[in-house]
Each structure stands twice: as structure tokens, then as C-alpha cells.
Image (cartoon, rainbow, N blue to C red):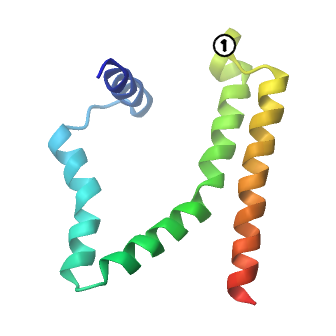
Amino acid sequence: MPFLRKVKMIMQGFVGFRIPVWLRRLVTMLPTFVVIGFGANPTRALIISQVVLSIALPVPMAMVVWFSSSRRWMGQHRNRHSTILVASFGAAVVMALNLVLLWQTLT
């Protein structure tokens, strides 16, 4: 659990305020209860949510590469050029696969 405490501390420092645990849990579980409450097929809802997440994934991936490569944000701990290249390649592969998925879906 020490890792989770560190992540919690980092997120609190990033957003600048504390969010109670009960509120975080409510916000993450509420969409599920709403979807099930409307009588949607849980399996289909799960598949749709995963498609949406796969389309949204490249944006945070690109931001993580950008932030972790920035001397302004990371200082001496910023990524090396080789790490930046590998991370950029991984993000580009995910983006390309999402474009292929969209192309296959729309045609």
C-alpha cells in the first residue's frame, strides 16, 4: 500500500486540494450504477466503455511523454532522449492502431 499512498500524495499536490475517499469512490462508481439502472446490457456497456477509453488513451499518453520530457516540469529527472523516443513510438503505435480500428468500423 505504500505505492498507493505516494500516488495519492502526488495527485493531491497536482490538483492542489484534497478529495475525500468516499467522494472519489462515489464519482467512479456512479456511472456504473446509472448505466445498470437504465437497464443496459452490462457486457455491451463494458465493451463500449473500453472502446471510448482506447480512443481517449493517446491524449494522456502524449501528455505523459511531454511532461516527463520537459526540463521545466521534471528538472534533472526528465527522460533521456532514448526513453522519449521509445515512449513516443509506443504512443504513436497506439494512435495508429486506434485509427485502424476507426477506419475498419466506419468502412
Q: Quadrant of residue 5?
A: top left
Instruction: Give the residue at x 29% y 84%.
Output: 40
Q: Residues within 10 Å of mark 1 (few under 14, many from 20)?
A: few
The residue that mark 1 highlights is 77
Q: Indicate left or right for 24 with 22 as reference.
A: right
From this view, report whether residue 83 is shown above or below residue 105.
above
The C terminus, quarter of image? bottom right
Of 21 and 82, nearer the camera is 82
Instruction: Give the residue at x 70% y 76%.
Output: 102
The N terminus, quarter of image? top left
Instruction: Give the residue at x 22% y 84%.
Output: 38
Of 107 and 60, nearer the camera is 107
Q: Quadrant of residue 35?
A: bottom left
From this view, report whether residue 78 is shown above or below residue 40.
above
Image coordinates of residue 33 in percent, x first then y, are 20, 69
Image coordinates of residue 2 in percent, x first then y, are 32, 18
The three-letter code of the residue at mark 1 reads: His
Q: Indicate left or right for 26 with 13 as reference.
A: left
Q: Indicate left or right for 8 with 69 as reference.
A: left
Residue with the most extreme bottom position: 107
Instruction: Give the residue at x 46% y 73%.
Output: 47
Q: What is the count of numbered marks?
A: 1
Image coordinates of residue 97 in percent, x first then y, are 74, 63
Q: Indicate left or right for 68 with 83 as reference.
A: left
Image coordinates of residue 81 in percent, x first then y, are 84, 23
Q: Quadrant of residue 41?
A: bottom left
Residue with the most extreme front position: 43
Residue with the most extreme top position: 76
**Which type of secondary structure does the marked residue at label 1 adopt?**
helix
